[in-house]
Amino acid sequence: MSDFPFLLLMIAVPAIGAAAVAALPRNREALAKQVSLGVSLVVLLLAVLATVAFDVGGDRFQLTSSWTWIADFGVSFALGVDGIALVMLLLIGVLVPVVIGASWRDEAGDRRPLTTYFAWLLLLEAMMVGVFAATDVFLFYVFFEAMLVPMYFIIGSFGGPRRQYAAVKFFLYSLVGGLVMLASVIGLYVVSNSQLGEGTFAFDALRQLEIDPGVQKLLFLGFFVAFAIKAPLVPFHTWLPDSGSEAPIGGAVLLVGVLDKVGTFGFLRYCLPLFPDASRYFAPFVLVLAVIGVLYAALLAMGQSDMKRLVAYTSISHFGFIALGIFAFTTEAATGAVLYMVNHGIATGLLFLVVGMLIARGGSRQIGDYGGVARKAPLLAGAFLVAGLASLALPGTNSFVSEFLVLIGSFPERPVFTIVATVGIILAALYILLMYQRTMHGPDRGVLMAEEDAEPAAGGGGATATLTAPRRSLRVADLDRRELAVVSPLVALIIVLGVYPQPLLDVIGPAVSATMSDLGGTD
């Protein structure tokens, strides 16, 4: 079963599905939805079967396959996964069907046909699988850059009022980071050519190179800039609040839940094993950025009035914890960081979905336009509460286990950074609970009426009329069957992984230990 081309099919199936959906007539939106959901469920099935075929005690990279691509430059279409990549493929397999189900209606409005939207989603899925499954550095770079295209069109064509600005900003930031990384990829090829007699991009071969510490620092910086932008770490983060707030909800879930993880995955897969001396040299600098990100983004989240923008800032804060776990250089902290990557995708994905459902009902992204929703939509409020509690890492939810592992694994090696980062836990409770309290409880504020729908305020004009902005009563329907089917898997995963995360830890642990061994670190 291990010889079956699971990874190749996980790339090919959604790519072919994207082409098939894009070829459908615009008036066949129902068929496009059904085909897209079916394709995404096939990918989920392949991810589950790949996990069953994966031997936890076996080789580091499994389910491998390789075909010569550009022979003159030693480039291969090489695929394989370790435990870190495998859990990310499972996350993709879970989130994409959920996103498609959540986008069943009202996602594209009247701007573009839904067939185009779902085609971009499937193509994005194929590119994301390729990023995590590639074991050839050049192939990784190709997928890294290629996945920008579908996300650019998802944001730019189907996003909010400032969608074009957000899409261009996202694309330019990521493209610049990718070009800087390309210089380091070429540098790796030159070094391999000088040491091995022929250039190669194969990860296993590059991992055996003995690179001069000075050269390591230069090559590390090229990869680091690209991954820090993608993660994103402060001060490379400014594209995410704009992209996360303007993207359609489905796109935002995949952007924050999966695409951003490419950055932290890159730290673990490439920066630490290939450049161990440089990683240790730059670790204090990265940890400073990580801790600043935890606190700075949490404080900014507290000041947001836009719900989607608030959730985007919470993700920047969470990525600070992930970076702390990676650059603490202990197996326990790094294992917690990888688990955090998965759990963050689930918890924040659910939070974005629930926020999107609330916005679809109220027509506003402003926190101040809502109140008393729990009395009218208890199921929606319940899903919101579970997502919020998972985001603040309440014990019993999935995020608690990963955050706890990061902190107890980081403290022995980096006590000062760990202590400062724990302040972010308190701030997380504030911004999550305040948002929940203001929207779900309290008086029913209603939503501001459009100017053409508003009637003159009673008592004539004057100052009183200016101060009493007209509002319409907010009619919030509770979750319907489709929406319950969308949120239920994520709620279940939050609870199950909060109580029993051991199956994921068993998969992640050996890959993290191998990475720490490449780094030369010991616990």
Image (cartoon, rainbow, N blue to C red):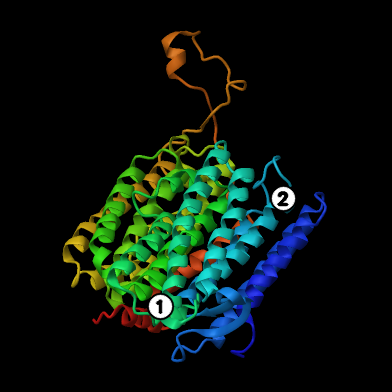
Task: State the quadrant of the N terminus.
Answer: bottom right
Q: Position of residue 251 (x, y in %)?
A: 57, 53
**Which element type, helix, strand or loop, lies under badge 2?**
helix
Instruction: Name the amino acid type tagged 2.
Output: Leu
Q: Position of residue 333 (x, y in %)?
A: 29, 72
Residue identifier under label 1: 500
Which one is nearer the viewer's eye here, 388 or 256?
Answer: 256
User: Is residue 108 in view from this perspective?
Assistant: yes
Above or below, 349 against 454 in this view is below
Which image quadrant is residue 407 in? bottom left
Above or below, 444 against 77 in this view is above
Q: Earlier in the sequence, mark 1 or mark 2?
A: 2
- Residue at 49% across, 76% down: 199
Residue identifier under label 2: 114
Q: Position of residue 189 (x, y in %)?
A: 47, 72
Q: Residues within 10 Å of mark 1 (few under 14, many from 20)?
A: some
Task: State the CA–CA distance, disc 1 to disc 2.
Answer: 38 Å
User: Is residue 91 in view from this perspective?
Assistant: no
Could you tell me if the residues under marks 1 and 2 are in contact, i.e. CB atoms within 8 Å?
no
Task: State the quadrant of the C terminus.
Answer: bottom left
- Residue at 44% across, 82% down: 196
Q: Residues within 10 Å of mark 2 (few under 14, many from 20)?
A: many
Kindly identify which numbered label has been placed on residue 18.
none
Instruction: Name the amino acid type tagged 1.
Output: Tyr
